[in-house]
Image: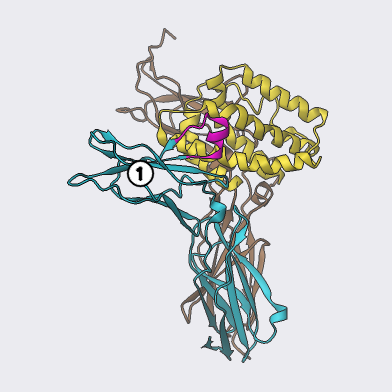
Chain colours: A cyan, B brown, C yellow
Amino acid sequence: DALLPAPQNISILSTNMKHFLTWSPVIIQRETVRYSVEFQGEYERDYANESWIPICECSFITATVCNITEDISATVAYKLRVRADVGTRRSEWGTLKGFFNRITTSLTPPVMKVTADGYHLLVELEDMGPAFQFCVLHWKKGQESRMQQKVVKEVDSVVHLDTMEAGTDYCVKAQTYVEVINRSSDFSQTQCVRTQGGRSVWLV
Amino acid sequence: SGELSCSLPNPRNVHFESVNMKNVLRWSAPEGTGGEVLYKVKYLVYGVGKWIRKPECRNINRTWCDLSSETSDYEEQYYASVKAFLNGMCSDWIETTRFNPLTDTKIDPPMVSVSSTERSISITLTAPEKWRSPEGESVSLLQVYPGLQYNVSVLNKKTKKRWFFSVSNNTLIVPRLEPGTAYCVSAEIYVTTPLLHSGFSKEYCIATLKDK
Amino acid sequence: SVTEIRSGFTAIKANIQARDPVRTLSILSYPHSLHKVQSSGRCCIAHNLFNFYVDKVFKHCKTEDSYINRKISSIANSFLSMKRKLGQCHEENKCMCGQESTEKFKQILANYEGLNVTSAAIKSLGELDILLDWMEKSR
């Protein structure tokens, strides 16, 4: 039996602290190729004889992607590897070039919806998982120098930001903050609303 | 009494049930038995050398035993154990898992009191007290969990819109409301680490006064 | 972060503590609770304990359960990154070790050496919430 080629083009897709390992399929005519993934954290490298840990959800899978979020759970450098199996034939490990540290995840601005209920400025934010907090800035239009900030941690609801004066435009923008990697996303688009004595009007 | 044979089936589901650190040991009767079984209880501070019998829970036929007093130091962890007796037979000692009052207790929602003016409501929140013995000193859960915060929900009964506030101090004033309108308030306690949520209290409704 | 370590530990607490049959001995709490350590010695004890867990404990906690092993790896790697942060304090001399904290850490090592290595490691891992409760209280 010819040696099975190791998976190639192994790479990481990491957005908003969700991390996926992907690779190119190993093509063997009329055969089903299955893949297995293992990871090695800095602890395993430096203190546990460079041992590797299998991810059972990605053992003998036919897909060429594996969600490794659950296992990349510390801000250290991880190594990842994949190998292929067809019947009794097994490839060498294909290893991700270099390391992956979750500190490099890309952070996108939060999805945000600003409303007013009477004289009250409200914001709804998309739930992005327990690692995320939101820094919400709000100000009277034209008074950008007097921005107020609110840190929001629980987002499964409509959050009250401030009380407004009648007939005034209020603007809001938000960014995410991930404490465990100490990084923030860019700010979202600014959204403005105006109160007219208890009725609110959208102003973008 | 003559030699006991320990072939009685064991008590089942031996566990601590804890609310605001009122720590009650509970269990179910051995399979196939009922109210005629008697029990003994002992407990142990984890890491300390000996099991201690609970005299008030000796030869009892109920299936619970209040160990709040014995487990009131929440900087320690505990085990408890139960043994069953029936017609000259006994069961094995059956233990709980390790009990950590700080992380394993459930917290009641805060007490909520609301008052209103024409255009505002003011909300006062009171965190529950930690369980204490009759002569014990009153300790708020705020002192036990310094990172304790409140989530407050305010529902406008007219518009059916609900807003949420997250506050760490225990008073909240919501100004610029509509006169003569009913608002319903409920609140929950949450602690980020260890992670504890009380769940929301029942709703307390109040109407803003009518415009004079 | 401490929150991540806490959630990793909560996921395996019952399993790990069930593997420790010795109720009457504690690595961290004998003879005195960590909470009795004076505030001046807390950074030193925390620094030493992080090194203790990384250097001595985690490597002897391998189990037959791959889910448990993955959670232990997650905790160990989180310890490593926190150990680095505490190490910086130590290097900047903000983490002085007085006599009391030195004695306390010596006692912890003696408790650890008093058991065979696997039992000691599993018991220490099962006592992680004692360390976390103490750290969060002192924050």
Using the rendered image of the protein, determine whether residue B4 is visible from the camera's viewpoint: yes
Residue that lies at the very extreme toward the front in this rendered image: A2
Q: Which residue is mark 1?
A: A58
How would you rate the neighbour count of disc 1 (Cα within 10 Å): few for under 14, some for 14-19, many for 20 or more? many
Where C128 sits versus B118, above or below?
Answer: above
The answer to which of B127 and B29 lies nearer the viewer is B127
Q: Residue at x 32, y 43 (%)?
A: A35
Residue B193: percent from the left, percent from the top?
A: 60, 48
Look at the image and say whether residue A41 sits in the magenta stretch. Answer: yes
Residue A98 in the image: state x and y as whole percent.
51, 46
Residue at 49% of width from left, 26% of height from top? B81
Return the x and y of residue A63 as percentages of the image width and height: 30, 50
The answer to whether residue C43 is left or right of residue A51 is: right
Q: Nearer the viewer, residue A11 or A46?
A: A11
Q: Is residue A186 above or below residue C24?
A: below
Image quarter (top left, top right, bottom left or bottom right) of the C terminus of chain B: bottom right
Amino acid type, residue under disc 1 in the picture: Cys
Quadrant for the N terminus of chain B in the image: top left
Per the rendered image, the range of residues in magenta is A40-52
A110 within the magenta span: no
